[in-house]
Amino acid sequence: MDTVIVTGASRGIGLHCAKQLHAAGYRVIGIARRFDAKPEYDVRTADVSDHSSLTAALQDLRRDRSVYALINAAGIASMNLLLTTPSQTIKRIIDTNLLGTIYASQIVSHALVRRGSGRIITFSSIAVAIGLQGESVYVASKAGVEGFTRSFAREMAPHGVTVNAVAPGPIDTDLIANVPAEKLQAIVDRQVIPQKASVEDVWKIVHMLLSPEGAMLSGQVFHVGGA
Amino acid sequence: MNNRDAVVDFLLQEVSTISGVPVGNLSESTPLIGGGTALNSRGLVELLVALEEFSEEKLHVHFDWTSDSAMSSNRSVYRTVASLADHIASLSPS
C-alpha cells in the first residue's frame, strides 16, 4: 500500500485530501500542530516550520519505500497591509508557508529517492498571479513556493519524482474565514472561471497529479479556476 | 580493516558502479563534486543513499547529509572520496 504524507492535515484542504486519500486506499500519515479529533488514519503532531520537530515525526519513514507522495497543505495567512504587520507575523507566515514546504519536501525526498518514483505537491494561491493587495507577505511566501517547485522539480526528475504546485482561488476554509465576502468575490471575479471552487475541486487536481496520468507533469503551477 | 578503510573501499566500489569508471581508475583523491567528478547530481544522491545505509548497518553511525559540518562550502566533506571517508570515520557510533 502506497503511503502519502499530508501536512496541514487537521483542517481545510489538507484535511479533505487526507480523508479522500484514506478513502481511496492509501496509507495516510497526517501532520499538524494539533488534531481536535482522531481520524481513522495515522496522525502525528509536528510544526512544519521546525525542522527538528518535522524530522522527528517522520524519522521512521526515511527509508520506507512505501512512501509515494507528500502533500504540502500546511499554510497560514494574515491579511494586513505590510506597514501594519508585526515582524513576528511576517516571520511566522514565511516560516510556515515557505520553509515548512521546503523542510517537508527535503525530509520526505529521502524516501522518494530510495523508491525511485513519487509525487510532491505544494500549494500556492491565486494571490501570487494577481498580486493581491493586502497579502504581500503571504504572496511572497507563496511566490517562493512556486519558485521552489519549479527548481526542485528539476532536481527530482532524475529520481522519477514529480513536483507540482496547486494554486487555488478563494476556497471556503478557515484560512479565509475572516476575509469580507465582497473582497473574496472580487478575487473570484478575476479568475478565468469566475466561480468559487471547493476543496473537492482542489482534491480532483491533487488526485490527477498522484495518478499515473500525472507522470509527465512536473514543475507546473495549476491554477484552480484559472488565473 | 578499520572504519575509514572500509568506507574508502565502499565508496570506490559505489562510485565505480554508478559512474561506470573502473575501480582501478579511482582513488582517495577522486572528486565527488565540482570539476573532474565522474558523478552527476543523480549519481551523487545515489551514492549518499547507499552510504547512509552502509554507515548505519555496517558501522552503526548515523550519517546526516545536511548537517552543517557536512555542508560547509569551504571544506565540504563531499570534496573527495578521502574527505567523505574521514567524515564518516569521525562520527560516533549511535
Image: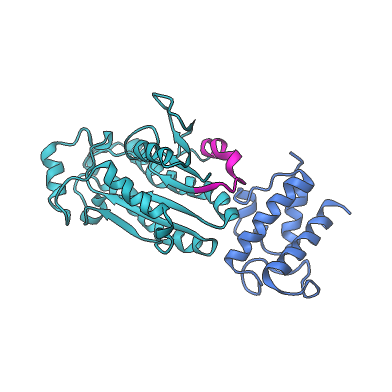
Chain colours: A cyan, B blue
Up/down of A82 relative to B35, above or below: above
Query: Residue B42's x, y, as percent?
Result: 58, 64
Within the magenta stretch, is there residue A56?
yes
Query: Residue A181's x, y, as percent?
Result: 13, 37
- Residue A177 falls in image quadrant: top left
User: Is there any visible trace of residue A175 in the rendered image?
Assistant: yes
Up/down of B23 relative to A146, above or below: below
Within the magenta stretch, is there residue B2?
no
Q: Describe residue A8's horizontal placement relative to residue A105 as left or right.
A: left
Up/down of B94 relative to A109, above or below: above
B8 or A162, which is in the foreground? A162
**Magenta span:** A52-68
Residue beneath the point at 69% across and 68% down: B31
B55 or A63, which is in the foreground? A63
Query: Residue A212's x, y, as percent?
Result: 44, 57
- How many marks can you see? 0
Q: Describe residue A134's horizontal placement relative to residue B44 as left or right.
A: left
Residue beneath the point at 33% across and 58% down: A221
Q: Quadrant of the C terminus of chain A?
A: bottom left
Residue beneath the point at 60% across and 45% down: A64
Query: Residue A138's x, y, as percent?
Result: 29, 45
A208 or A69, which is in the foreground? A208
User: Is there any visible trace of residue A137 in the rendered image?
Assistant: no
